[in-house]
Amino acid sequence: MSSPTGLSESSLAALRHMREQREINTVILRYAGAQGVLVPEIEGNLTHDELLQSLPADEPRLVVHELAFADPEGTRRHAQLLILWMPLDASEQEWAYSDGFTALREFLPDVHVHLTARRTDQLAYRRLVALSG
């Protein structure tokens, strides 16, 4: 797997840590303006509520999150999500984050749920579970 353009070494390390060690379930990335690359802002084991609280109201972010849920039969499941958080007030930064989103989709081919959210209600737990299905 080659490194996508625009990801810092620290971002790659955070994503590998999440996928290989499984000690964390969330990596939130932001663009470092001067460097022009994505850097990790948060690496943690976040609940759904903590994830929503971590997203700034007026700035975009890229999020890789492992969602834990039970299917209708009660079996515990996990699904990785790639989220482009793009609040309405941050539209001038959309092109840069869209490029990062595309790079992450290619870098993480086994993540099958990709979504763009402009409001937190678009990240409602039940909606994410339905998408992960």
Image (cartoon, helix red, strand yellow):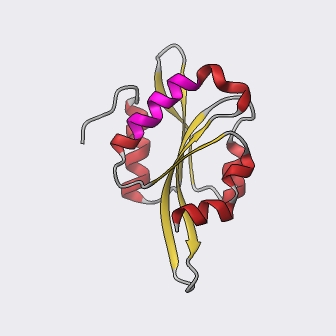
The reply, left or right, for residue 122 in relation to residue 101 is right
In the depicted structure, whether residue 129 falls above or below residue 14: below
Residue 99 drawn in magenta: yes
Instruction: Please provide the residue range marked out in magenta.
Output: 94-104
Q: How many labels does the image show?
A: 0
66 or 10, nearer to the observer:
66
Considering only vertical position in the picture, is 54 above or below 77?
above
* Residue drawn at 58 percent across, 26 percent down: 94
Name the residue rendered at 49%, 67% in the picture.
Answer: 78
72 versus 114 height, above or below? below
Farthest left residue in view: 1
Residue 32 falls left or right of residue 20: right
Image coordinates for residue 58, horizontal then vertical, percent: 73, 29
Q: What main secondary structure does the magenta stretch of the protein show? A: helix
Residue at far bottom of view: 73
Q: Which residue lies furthest to the top in this view?
A: 34
Residue 97 rendering spot, x and y as whole percentages: 52, 29
Q: In this view, does 69 lie to the left or right of 12?
A: right
Residue at 61% over, 60% down: 128
53 versus 58 height, above or below: below
Question: In front: 87, or 4?
Answer: 87
Residue 29's x, y, as percent?
53, 36
